[in-house]
Image (cartoon, rainbow, N blue to C red):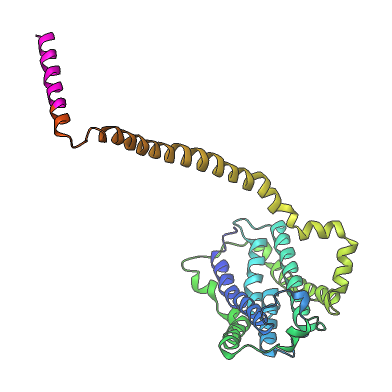
């Protein structure tokens, strides 16, 4: 959106490392808990599945944008060009991206606390069978965690610059680069601190905040009712149109009706004409005689 295509690809590369590590780490947690997926029924897993925990923690720090891990380098580049790019950067766009970075750091460290660092909330039968995942799973996590840590030092934008040159930055804006970098780190740490403050003792404080701001929590929990609005305005009307018009009228009445109607017509016509095929030679001779008489009569009438 601001012309920094090489930086965007850089973030896709680093993102592949830590986001894949997080997804596979979640799978490792689910495997360790025999299929349990509700984070409110977890906790205390840091010591029980340490490899999964440390790899997940590294990926979490990376995605939050804390230096010197991979996510910091690519996310900071994106923030800088959303602010300073001559191809569409602006302080307002930077503010939106910074707010998104804050929320990312907050909800990721919330996840880390609730799953690994808070007291256990696991059911007894689940907790009894908690086990670290096999090397076939943790080995991949370790490779991805390593890349999440050092992948930012691969200078992807520099290598791509001959094909995807970086957008111009006005000279008057260069002195903002270091303050904005420091501010982006502060934002990431603020998200970490906020999640730690609310969730380090478990979900109770978060649940209390949700009750205090019940309306806002309901709005956010229901995702602004976008799904319900979409279903009411588009889902159900399109379903009715598909069922009643395209399927009921178009397919079943027009297409199937015409084809089946022609088939029934052919069947009934064949039934009528099949009565002529009696196998009686005398009847056939009578038909021939009738035909000859009709032909003579027509010839006589029309000269």
Q: Position of residue 157 (x, y in %)?
A: 54, 71
Query: Is 282 left, or right, of 239 in this rendering?
Result: left
Q: Nearer the viewer, residue 277 or 253?
A: 277
Does residue 302 appear in the picture of this structure?
no
* Side of 220 relative to 240 (left or right): right
Q: Residue at x 12, y 23 (%)?
A: 289
Q: Which residues are magenta?
A: 286-303
Q: Quadrant of the C terminus?
A: top left
Above or below 296: residue 75: below
Residue 302 forms part of the magenta stretch: yes
In the rendered image, the vertical position of residue 292 relative to residue 253, given as above or below: above
Q: Residue at x 12, y 18 (%)?
A: 293
Would you say the magenta stretch is mainly helix, strand or loop? helix
Query: Based on the displayed image, in which of its 4 quarters is residue 268 positioned?
Result: top left
Q: From the top left corner, tell me how far across and down residue 263 is, in percent.
A: 35, 39
Q: Along the line of sight, which residue is nearer the eye, 73 or 230?
A: 230
């Amino acid at each position: 959106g601001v012309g920094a295509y090489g930086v965007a690809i850089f973030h896709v590369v680093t993102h592949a490392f830590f986001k894949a590590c997080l997804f596979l780490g979640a799978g490792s947690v689910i495997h360790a808990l025999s299929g349990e997926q509700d984070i409110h029924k977890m906790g205390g897993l840091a010591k029980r599945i340490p490899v999964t925990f440390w790899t997940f923690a590294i990926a979490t720090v990376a995605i939050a944008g804390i230096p010197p891990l991979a996510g910091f380098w690519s996310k900071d580049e994106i923030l800088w060009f959303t602010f300073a790019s001559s191809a569409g950067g602006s302080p307002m766009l930077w503010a939106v991206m910074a707010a998104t970075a804050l929320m990312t750091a907050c909800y990721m460290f919330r996840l880390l606390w609730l799953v690994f660092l808070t007291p256990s909330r696991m059911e007894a039968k689940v907790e009894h069978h908690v086990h670290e995942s096999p090397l076939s799973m943790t080995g991949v996590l370790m490779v991805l965690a390593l890349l999440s840590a050092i992948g930012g030092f691969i200078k992807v934008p520099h290598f791509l610059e001959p094909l995807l040159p970086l957008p111009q930055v006005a000279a008057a804006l260069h002195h903002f680069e270091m303050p904005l970098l420091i501010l982006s780190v502060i934002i990431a740490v603020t998200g970490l601190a906020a999640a730690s403050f609310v969730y380090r003792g478990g979900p109770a404080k978060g649940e209390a905040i949700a009750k205090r701001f019940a309306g806002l929590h309901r709005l956010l929990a229901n995702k602004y009712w976008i799904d319900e609005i979409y279903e009411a305005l588009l889902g159900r009307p399109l379903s009715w149109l598909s069922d009643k018009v395209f399927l009921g009228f178009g397919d079943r009445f027009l297409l199937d009706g015409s084809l089946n109607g022609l088939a029934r017509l052919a069947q009934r016509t064949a039934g009528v004409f099949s009565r002529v095929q009696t196998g009686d030679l005398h009847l056939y001779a009578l038909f021939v005689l009738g035909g000859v008489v009709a032909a003579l009569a027509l010839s006589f009438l029309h000269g």
